[in-house]
Amino acid sequence: MFIFLLQVRHMLGGHPERDPDRRSRRNGTSPCSGLARRRRDRRVHWIKSPPERGRGRRGPRAADASGTVENEIVYATGLTLLGVVERLTGGWGLDGRMFTAVYFAGEEAWYVQFWLFLCGLLFALFLGSVFAAVWVRWKAVGLVTTFILLAFLLVGVAALLTLGGLWDDAWATITRLGWVGASSASLAITALLGVLGFVLLRGATPKS
């Protein structure tokens, strides 16, 4: 969610004191190129003008989503490298674990660790984007309602598994899939969360 909110702030143009172009415009000068200025203006216009969306232009939403996915790839790569160093140093000389994708199964190859990190980060990113989109559209009331509905859903699933005696089958399925299979399967949920966040944010009307 934190990463998503940073992306939204970036789309809105950043802080005036940290944006040299905005400072220069206040002073009557503009050291930035006209191309960069036009790109920024289009980005801000798309965010602040919801009625113009969906009229034959994709807007920056696809680019922003691809940018956040690229960030997650970078983060996963960094965590994987730290995990390799951790293994080579015997847990930083303390036989500890800080950068293994799965604490009790941290002996997998580096590419397996990378995939587990990446799937987990993408899931967290797009889940956070849904909550952020709900906040943008319905503020605190929508967010509280979402958490209440989510709690009912989780309790309902747990009750269904308990009353139906399906816990053993669920664990057996996860075990059969393994860490890699379960992480790969989570991408389907991640994709649904991404679509849901897009739909919610697309229908939001920012208020000043």
Image (cartoon, rainbow, N blue to C red):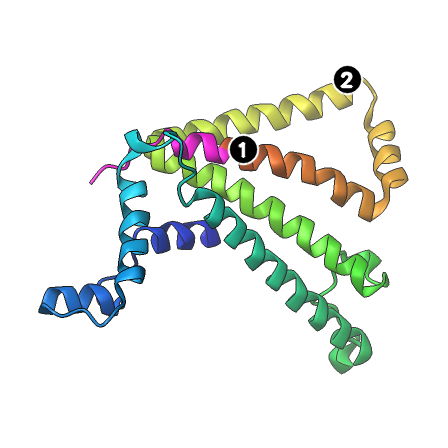
Residue 192 on image: x %, y % = 60, 32
Q: Residue furthest left?
A: 28
Vertical relation: 113 (above or below) 23: above
In the rendered structure, the answer to whether residue 148 lies left or right of residue 29 reads: right
In the rendered structure, the answer to whether residue 188 lies left or right of residue 53 reads: right
Is disc 1 placed on a helix, strand or loop? helix
Q: Which residue is mark 1?
A: 195
Given residues 168 and 184, the one toward you in this image is: 184
Where does the magenta region start and end? 197-208
Residue 164 on image: x %, y % = 80, 17
Disc 1 residue crowd, few under 14, some 14–19, many 20+, Cα 10 Å: some
Q: Residue at x 77, y 22 (%)?
A: 162
Q: Which mark is residue 102?
A: none
In the rendered structure, the answer to whether residue 23 lies left or right of residue 100 reads: left
Vertical relation: 201 (above or below) 64: above
Q: Residue at x 60, y 24 (%)?
A: 153
Identity, as a three-letter code, of the amino acid under mark 1: Val
